[in-house]
């Protein structure tokens, strides 16, 4: 299904990260990470090429907002997998324009 696409996993809960890793691998993807902090995710994005990302919103060193901004700038599509309510995600990412979101999402098609 994923055709060996590299998927960044950003999740600070070890069991959830492991479950996501297994799911991506079972779907034929290659996992980048998983990492559990904003700092680690940003470092990986400087070194690795990824096709998409799965993000938790609240990480060990803060919210994922900086990672979202970096992904949008790179045109990398993302999904949020989190216990945080959708309205909280929207509030944390409000600095990202609608056109950036749409451009990022359209690349996933």
Image (spheres, rainbow, N blue to C red):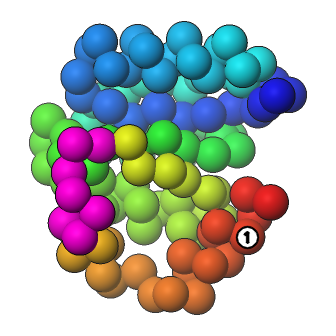
Which residue of the protein is positioned furthest toward the left in this rendering? 61
Q: Is residue 40 left or right of residue 51?
A: left
Look at the image and tell me whether residue 76 can be seen: yes
Query: Which residue is the site of mark 1?
Result: 106
Q: Is residue 23 magenta?
A: no
Left or right of 62? Residue 103 is right
State whether residue 74 is above or below residue 4: below
Query: If the image is split into quadrants, where does the C terminus sit?
Result: bottom right
Q: Quadrant of the image for the N terminus? A: top right
Q: Residue at x 37, y 20 (%)?
A: 17
Q: Residue at x 62, y 34 (%)?
A: 7
Which of the 4 quarters of the picture holds residue 107? bottom right
Q: Say above or below: 48 vs 58.
A: above
Please name the residue shown 14% across and 42% down the image: 61
Q: Is residue 39 visible?
A: no
User: Residue 25, percent across and down?
Assistant: 65, 14
45 vs 38, left or right, is: right
The segment highlighted magenta reads 82-88
Image location (x, y in percent) of residue 82: 29, 43
| Image-quadrant location for residue 86 | bottom left
């Amino acid at each position: 299904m994923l055709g060996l696409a590299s998927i960044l996993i950003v999740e600070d809960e070890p069991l959830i990260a492991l479950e996501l890793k297994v799911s991506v691998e079972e779907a034929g993807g290659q996992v980048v990470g998983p990492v559990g902090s904003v700092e680690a995710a940003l470092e990986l994005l400087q070194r690795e090429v990824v096709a998409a990302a799965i993000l938790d919103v609240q990480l060990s060193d803060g919210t994922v907002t900086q990672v979202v901004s970096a992904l949008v700038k790179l045109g990398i599509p993302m999904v949020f997998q989190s216990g945080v309510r959708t309205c909280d995600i929207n509030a944390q990412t409000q600095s990202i324009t609608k056109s950036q979101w749409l451009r990022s999402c359209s690349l996933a098609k």
